[in-house]
Amino acid sequence: MHTLFFKKYFFINNFDANLIKCQDNNTSIIYRNYRKKNYLDDIFKLKKICKKYKYKLILANDVKLAIKLGLDGAYLPSFNNTFDHLSYSLKKDFVLLGSAHNLKEIKIKDKQKVNRIFLSSIFKKNNNYLGINKFKNLIKIHNKEFVALGGIDQSNIKKLKLLGVKEFSGINYFLKKKAP
């Protein structure tokens, strides 16, 4: 049987060592906690475990802190329309990710000079639902790396390969994995 190899991004809101340990090497961890005011302890624990298991650690919505803590990158959500990070000095291997739901947001992420754009929602039928055809059309018109987001699970992951998508992100896909 042919195995599908994707680059994966796992969104987490809280530190859970058992859940993180059971991911594979192609997984990067994106820490996004918009509710907690003091989350530095979580970041330090995550940094330690990610280093041990050789995962990339990316911080959401705070490029300056990600640089200061020596993390692997930062993630700019669709609601972040600032350009402050363009004045920061970034390491060569620092990755800047951003999310978008439509053409207007893709253009903003392009101006923010993100390396990859998380485009949602491909399968999950919510307010941002694109579906396969709109998703395919949006990724055709831009010369960026796109990451599929929204409703991805074991039942529809093969459809990503047909779309030519090499990377995906989510939460539920990763929560179903159990630690050994």
Image (spheres, helix red, strand yellow):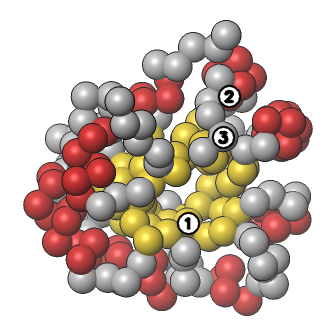
Residue nearest the observer in this picture, 61 or 163 = 163
Which residue occupies 32% across, 82% down?
Answer: 142
Q: Name the residue under label 2.
A: 20
Q: Mark 3 points at which residue?
A: 25
* C-alpha span from label 2 to label 1: 20 Å
Q: Looking at the image, is mark 3 or mark 2 earlier in the sequence? A: 2
Q: Can residue 16 be seen in this view?
A: no
Which residue occupies 42% across, 30% down?
Answer: 173
Q: How crowded is mark 3: few (under 14 residues within 10 Å), some or many (20 or more)?
A: few
Q: Nearer the viewer, mark 3 or mark 2?
A: 3
Please tell me whether mark 3 sits on a helix, a strand or a loop.
loop
Q: Residues within 10 Å of mark 1 (few under 14, many from 20)?
A: many
Q: Are marks 2 and 1 in contact (CB under 8 Å)?
A: no
Q: Position of residue 32 (x, y in %)?
A: 61, 46
Q: Say which mark, if any, is on residue 97.
A: 1
Q: Where is residue 80 in the image (x, y as percent from the top left)?
A: 51, 68
Q: Looking at the image, is mark 2 or mark 1 earlier in the sequence? A: 2
Which residue occupies 60% across, 45% down?
Answer: 26
Task: Identify the amino acid type marked 3.
Answer: Asn
From the viewer's perspective, is 45 left or right of 24?
right
Q: Do the residues labelled 3 and 2 touch (CB within 8 Å)?
A: no
Which residue occupies 41% across, 57% down?
Answer: 166
From the viewer's perspective, is 16 left or right of 143?
right
In the image, is residue 125 above or below residue 165?
above
Quadrant of residue 135 within the rendered picture: bottom left
Please tell me whether mark 1 sits on a helix, a strand or a loop.
strand
Residue nearest the observer in this picture, 135 or 167 = 167
